Amino acid sequence: MDGANSRDQPEFGPAADDRAIIERSRQEPEQFALLFRRHADGLSRYVTRRLGQQNAEDIVAEVFLTAFRQRDRFDPSRADARPWLHGIAANLIRRHHRDETRWLRALERTGVDPVADSAADLAEARLTADAAARAVAAAVAALGPQQRDVVLLITWAGLTYDQAAEALGIPEGTVRSRMNRARSRLRAALAEFRPDEYLRNEEISHA
């Protein structure tokens, strides 16, 4: 785009929703870069927690490349692109199920959270103490892939139940059911470490 056209089409401000950015990117593809700047860091932290830094960079790049290619499919009734982006990420992460399990087992042994510093402001999703990190990693590694996706989208990605359902393309009731089945295992693993600080949703904290 030349300089004159750039002046005619100002950048979106921080208040612009993702839907508007994606809509405009259909005519002006360069606008899609704003979606990347807005969500890449959060998505990278999430994928790094699940697969480690080595795989995260490639997966995040593939998420946004896929999203760009499929932007015409984005549901215009949705204002927030995070569930859509995390849904793409979930499909890619499933290809690395064995890598993820090995990564979680390594975290269980070491207790070292790879993004603890960069995600320090996300108290609900933070693995704080080494012992708690190991307990969490062991419990999450023991979950089946479907339960794991639900639990980590809600706890680590910070999505709501309905957003997790959107990301995974399943009914919200299924999300709640999977979360409930995983809850007792996670709560037992975290009993010594204030599970309410990790599992923030009130439906997890109450039977």
Image (cartoon, rainbow, N blue to C red):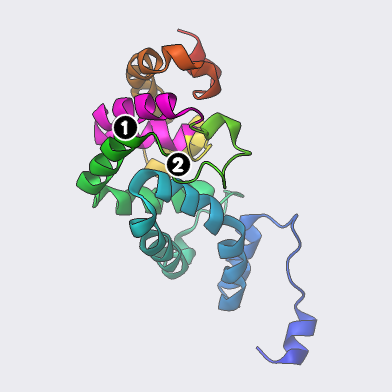
| Magenta-colored segment: predominant secondary structure | helix
Mark 2, residue position: 166
- Measuring from the top left, give residue 17's x and y in whole percent: 67, 54
- Measuring from the top left, give residue 28's x and y in whole percent: 60, 78
Measure the C-alpha gap from mark 2 to mark 1.
Answer: 30 Å
Residue 62 visible in the displayed image: yes
* Label 1, residues with CA under 10 Å away: few <14, some 14-19, many ≥20: many
Residue placed at 48% from the left, 37% from the top? 156
Determine whether 147 is above or below 24 in the image. Answer: above
Q: Is the C terminus in the top left, top right, bottom left or bottom right quadrant?
A: top left
- Measuring from the top left, give residue 16's x and y in whole percent: 72, 57
Q: For this rendering, which residue is in front, 165 or 203?
A: 203
Q: Which callout, 2 or 1, points to the residue nearer the camera? A: 1
> Which portion, as a residue range, is magenta?
128-155
Secondary structure beneath dot 1 equals: helix
Under mark 1, the amino acid is: Glu
Determine whether 4 is above or below 72 in the image. Answer: below
Q: Are marks 2 and 1 in contact (CB under 8 Å)?
A: no
Secondary structure beneath dot 2 equals: helix
